[in-house]
Structure formats: C-alpha cells, structure tokens
Image (tube, helix red, strand yellow):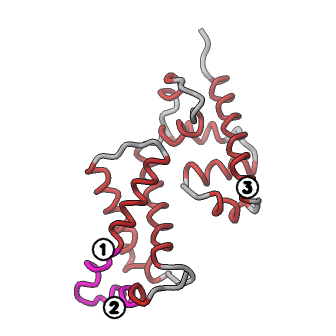
Amino acid sequence: MALLDIDRNLLERCLNGKPRAWEDFVDRFMGLVVHVINHSAQCRSINLNATDREDLTAEVFLAIVDNNMAALRHFRGKSSLATYLTVIARRVVVRKLVEGHASVPLDAMVAEAACDDTELEQRISNREEVDRLLSGLQGSEAAVVRLYHLEGQSYEEISRTVGMPTNSVGPMLCRARAKLRRRASADQPTG
C-alpha cells in the first residue's frame, strides 16, 4: 500500500518540527499503538492493567522520537506508515513484555494448550532459563522459536528471515515446543 497523502504531510510536519505536528501524529496513531499492545499481550497470555498499557504506549512513542525521530527519518515509504509503525510498536512491546514477564512467553511455548503443569510455570521464570531451554534446539528450530515467541514476528516475517515456506513455520514451532516440553520435564528434579 502506498503512503497516503495525509501521512506524508504529517510525517513531513513532524520531521520539520511544525507546531502541533507531534500531537496530530499521536492522535492519528494512538489507536494503532494501543491495538498492537493489546494484541501482543493477548498473544502471550499477559493481562495488562491501564498503567501497563500507558507505560507501553509511552515506550512505543519514545522509540519513535528517540534520536531526533530517527525511526521516522528511516521510513522509506515502501509500505504504509501504519504498517511501518505497527512493526516498530510490536518490536518495542514484545521486548518490554519479555523483559517484564519473561516466564509468560516461555509458558506459551512450553505449556501451550496441552500442558497445565503449574510447577513448570513456576520453575521457568527468567530469560536465562529461556535461553538455556532454547539452547537444546538446533539451527532453524531455535531461530523460529526466538523470532516468534521472543521477537513477536509473524509467520510471514519468519519465513522471509529464515528462508523457509510460510506453511512450514507452524509445524516447526509445534515440533520445537514438543522438544522444549520434553527437555523441561527431563530437567525437573525427581522425588
């Protein structure tokens, strides 16, 4: 989708520091950012309160204005501005969610749908544990799990990054999750 004239104008106004440009930008894209926050949290089974949502919203807009609006200056118009901002917002939000709730994304990987083992949930509580479990995966399996669960990429994005068909991403994630479940179960102390 091409860059809309309204977005091109808004982008130019922001980059040139015109009065009310930033306020207009925030007004235009606030709903998009909140949607990305809600969707990203929901996909990771994380419940957000109003304060969390406001903090994440601020983090996204801070990332956009950081370094004299470098994110906006790097926009090349190869997609709509909304699509570009969605990618930025998702990356910021997923990074913050992983930092603040490291056990939840791994819970989604290890316990997804079939595993209700609360001891496992409690055991897997930090990023080091995530990395340790992921070290048991090889090559593209580890890359696909990291890209999907830790970086929040879509199947299509993973497909392009890893160089595999989009319809192969889901089955690979399923196999990798099964391996992670087996490894986590084997690592639990007995008796």
According to the picture, the residue beneath numbered tag 1 turns out to be 26
In the image, taking residue 153 as reference, residue 162 lies left or right, namely: right
Q: Main secondary structure of the magenta part?
A: helix
- Between discs 1 and 3, the one toward the N terminus: 1
Question: Residue at 48% of width from left, 45% of height from top?
Answer: 44
Q: Secondary structure at mark 1?
A: helix
Question: Residue at 72% of width from left, 41% of height from top?
Answer: 137
- Amino acid at the residue labelled 1: Val
In the image, taking residue 20 as reference, residue 70 lies left or right, namely: right
According to the picture, the residue beneath numbered tag 3 turns out to be 167
**Relative height, residue 129 to residue 156 (above, below):** above
Name the residue furthest top. 191
- Amino acid at the residue labelled 3: Asn
- Between discs 2 and 3, the one toward the N terminus: 2
Q: Does the magenta portion include 20?
A: yes
Question: Residue at 40% of width from left, 45% of height from top?
Answer: 100
- Amino acid at the residue labelled 2: Asn
Closest to the camera, between mark 1 and mark 3, is: 3
Q: Secondary structure at mark 3?
A: helix
The magenta region covers: 9-28
